[in-house]
Amino acid sequence: MSSTHLIKDSFSMFRRCMLISLRKPDALVTSIVAPVCMMLLFVLVFGESMNVGGGSFVNFIVPGVLLQCIGQCATFTAMTVNEDLTKGIFDRFRSMPIAKSAVLTGHVLAATARNIIATTAVIGAAFLVGFRPEASFVQWLGIAGVLLLFMLAITWLSVVFGIAVKSTESAGALMIPVTILPYISSGFVPVESIAAGLQSFAQHQPMTPIIDTVRALSMGLTAPTNTWQIAVLWCVGIITGSYLVAVQMYRRRMSG
């Protein structure tokens, strides 16, 4: 199987997944509306009473909202992957002369495209409620790079969940913790203000270094070396592990 053939097949699967997204716009809209509503709730209702070290509260929470948005998009990916499996679509693809890995790659590429659309919309909404970043062009590139890595990490994880379970409802349910994790991190309040029993978890789970890196860059600061390195390591580790597990599970399901 040539690399040209693989790229062509992956693009075909990507186009198919995007067409499915267009036929189900409610999933993309939900991925945007839910984080935006949560941001409005925090800013307009709780903003005046929140202490984030004297800075702007909306500037503080936007990175957490973005990760929540990406998690919402990943839920749809898990469900569409599972739907393809349970409805026999993958079995049809197996009988066609296409690269088998292109099926999963198409889902990942489409999920990344949906994520980019959703996060751009959320950032636009954040500007309307007072988000005022101070990032330079290079820092914006850094933000985009970190968010893209996180998108790929959560998307490949959602593919694993989509293959692992037997129903779309279960696939969606498995992604719920991903959308909750930003709340148990530095996403909406400083870690120091979280209940003592959860502080250690908040400090060492992957969302916190990713959020801290995006927040520092958006405010025009240099992200601490250990913070951005840990963020990148988390993302690369999740991508690598999830990819290997997803491919192995997919091959097993297809040969069963």
Image (cartoon, rainbow, N blue to C red):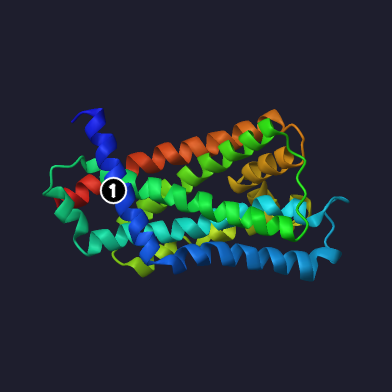
Q: Nearer the viewer, residue 147 or 6?
A: 6
Left/right of residue 147 with respect to residue 101 in the rendered view? right
Q: Nearer the viewer, residue 55 or 167?
A: 55
Q: Residue at 37% of width from left, 55% of height from top?
A: 18
Q: Secondary structure at mark 1?
A: helix
Q: Quadrant of residue 183?
A: bottom right
Give coordinates of residue 137: x percent, y percent.
68, 33
Q: Residue at 82% of width from left, 61% of height from top?
A: 50
Give coordinates of residue 97: x percent, y percent.
13, 42
Asked whether the viewer can see residue 184, the reply is no
Count up the numbered dots: 1
Q: Quadrant of the N terminus?
A: top left
Q: Residue at 44% of width from left, 66% of height from top?
A: 25
Q: Is residue 231 above or below residue 162?
A: above
Q: Residue at 34% of width from left, 39% of height from top?
A: 244
Q: Label 1 neighbourhood size at 10 Å, few (<14), some (14-19), many (20+)? A: many
Left/right of residue 254 with respect to residue 231 in the rendered view? left
Give coordinates of residue 103: x percent, y percent.
27, 47
The residue identified by callout 1 is 13
Asked whether the viewer can see residue 206, the reply is yes
Left/right of residue 133 with respect to residue 119 in the rendered view? right
**Label 1 amino acid?**
Met
Specify the farthest residue to the left.
Answer: 95
Left/right of residue 92 with respect to residue 179 in the rendered view? left
Give coordinates of residue 241: x percent, y percent.
40, 39
